[in-house]
Amino acid sequence: MKKIVLALAVAVATAAAANAQTAAKQTAPAKQTATKPAKEPAKAPAAKSMSTKGEVVSTDATAKTVTVKDAAGTSTTYTATGAAVAELAKLSAGDHVTVTHTDTTATKIVKAKAATTKSTSKKSEKK
């Protein structure tokens, strides 16, 4: 009987020691020196800007959105931010624009200039 009690006591003591070591590793504070500040978390990379050329389908100044149909016929609605918000007032359906955007956030809207045609007239030749 003494052997069984002794074996149980050794097993409990061993388990308690192992548990204490594991708990100490998990709860131990990270070592930091006073001269070095903790590292800041890495910032997510900025989304890459893209440009889309197309025709304005509609604008909504209240919601700050513009819907543009590209050359492939796909319509996309962009939410204007910054300077692009001011450009919304200058747009109307049918205008051709270039929208600089990240995902569906327009950061720049440039209205395409109307194509200018030069009329060439032939001067009459004098004989």
Image (spheres, grey):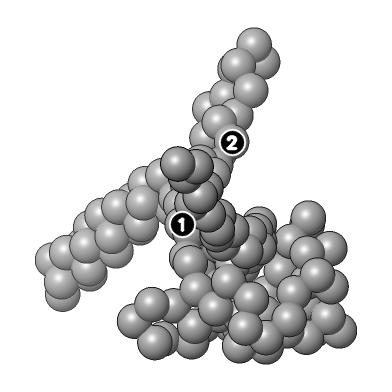
Q: Nearer the viewer, mark 2 or mark 1?
A: 1
User: In the rendering, at what x and y percent does residue 48 appear?
Assistant: 46, 52
Q: Secondary structure at mark 1?
A: strand
User: Horizontally, is 90 left or right of 9 in the view?
Assistant: right
Residue density around tag 1, few if under 14, some if 14–19, many if 20 or more, within 10 Å = few
Q: CA distance from mark 2 to mark 1?
A: 29 Å
User: Horizontally, is 6 left or right of 80 in the view?
Assistant: left
User: In the rendering, at what x and y percent does residue 105 appear?
Assistant: 61, 68
Q: Is residue 17 visible?
A: yes
Residue topped by disc 1 = 50
Report the front residue among 53 and 9.
53
Report the front residue among 108 and 5.
108
User: In the rendering, at what x and y percent does residue 2 appear?
Assistant: 18, 68
Q: Which quarter of the rendering shows the N terminus?
A: bottom left
Residue topped by disc 2 = 40
Q: Is residue 122 above or below residue 38?
A: below
Q: Secondary structure at mark 2?
A: loop
Q: What amino acid does circle 1 point to?
A: Met
Q: Are marks 2 and 1 in contact (CB under 8 Å)?
A: no
User: Horizontally, is 84 left or right of 89 in the view?
Assistant: left
Question: At 36% from the left edge and 57% from the top edge, which residue is drawn?
Answer: 19
